[in-house]
């Protein structure tokens, strides 16, 4: 049964059933991330990836980037060796989060879209474990333009039920302004502290703005 997440109500009941279960995240695979197949490749994927990493580092600083090293290595590996193609841009984003009983609120920065705020609805199927998460997230950039994606992933709890770790994949579903008609795919990984109601999330993938 799918239920909207209730961080202070529904999840504690779930904790009691799951405290002894070990963590096991589902990695985002190379097959999840696709890009257009225009025959004219641009810069190599390694070059584009390093550009994205350097841009993110300039925004969030060396200390935060150091903490993200394992996730960034996972992200680069999931992209495989496919050459970046014309029409698709690599996308890398990091955000901090807070959440309440029904929504997740994000403040972050992403290549292509720059600084943004976002709101995500969050629906959890806790009839299975790892539990399944369904979200619809809308990012709003500094110009007020919006871009939305739908995602599905899995989440697990640590032994004392205070932290959830999650990962999954997403698909851009369009937006307003410069993001109208946007397409592409994403992967993500993150965590949330269920005592402090804060967390962080890293996104990576492809975006095509049809420009």
Image (cartoon, rainbow, N blue to C red):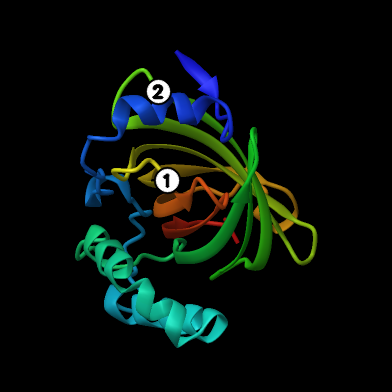
Query: Which quadrant of the figure contains the N terminus?
Result: top left
Q: Residue at x 32, y 51 (%)?
A: 33
Q: In the rendered structure, which disc, 1 or 2, sits on the residue that comes first in sequence?
A: 2
Give the side of residue 99 with respect to residue 13, left or right. right
Total marks placed: 2
Q: Secondary structure under badge 2?
A: loop
Q: Which callout, 1 or 2, points to the residue nearer the camera?
A: 1
Question: Which residue position is annotated with label 2?
Answer: 126
Q: Residue at x 31, y 74 (%)?
A: 69
Rounded to the nearest whole Å, what is the CA distance between mark 1 and mark 2? 16 Å
Location of residue 158 by image quarter: top left
Q: Secondary structure under badge 1?
A: loop
Badge 2: how crowded within 10 Å, few (<14), some, or many (20+)?
A: some
Q: Which mark is residue 162?
A: 1
Q: Residue at x 80, y 58 (%)?
A: 144
Query: Which quadrant of the figure contains the C terminus?
Result: bottom right
Residue 131, image x, y percentages: 35, 29
Give the side of residue 171 with respect to residue 103, left or right. left
Badge 1: how crowded within 10 Å, few (<14), some, or many (20+)?
A: some
Q: Is residue 114 above or below residue 129?
A: below
Give the side of residue 144 with respect to residue 162, left or right. right
Residue 97, image x, y percentages: 58, 55
């Amino acid at each position: 049964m799918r239920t909207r997440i209730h961080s202070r109500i529904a999840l504690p009941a779930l904790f009691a059933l799951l405290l002894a279960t070990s963590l096991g995240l589902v990695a985002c695979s190379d097959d999840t991330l696709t890009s257009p197949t225009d025959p004219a490749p641009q810069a190599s994927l390694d070059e584009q990836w390093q550009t994205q990493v350097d841009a993110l580092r300039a925004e969030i600083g060396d200390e935060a980037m150091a903490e993200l090293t394992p996730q960034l290595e996972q992200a680069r590996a999931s992209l495989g060796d496919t050459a970046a193609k014309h029409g698709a841009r690599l996308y890398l984003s990091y955000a901090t989060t807070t959440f309440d009983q029904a929504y997740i609120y994000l403040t972050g920065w992403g290549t292509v879209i720059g600084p943004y705020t976002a709101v995500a609805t969050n629906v959890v199927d806790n009839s299975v474990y790892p539990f399944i998460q369904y979200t619809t997230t809308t990012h709003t950039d500094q110009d007020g333009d919006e871009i939305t994606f739908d995602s599905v992933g899995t989440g697990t709890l640590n032994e004392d039920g205070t932290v959830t770790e999650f990962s999954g994949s997403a698909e851009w579903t369009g937006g307003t302004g410069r993001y109208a008609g946007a397409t592409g795919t994403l992967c993500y990984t993150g965590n949330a502290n269920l005592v402090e109601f804060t967390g962080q999330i890293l996104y990576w993938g492809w975006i095509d703005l049809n420009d």
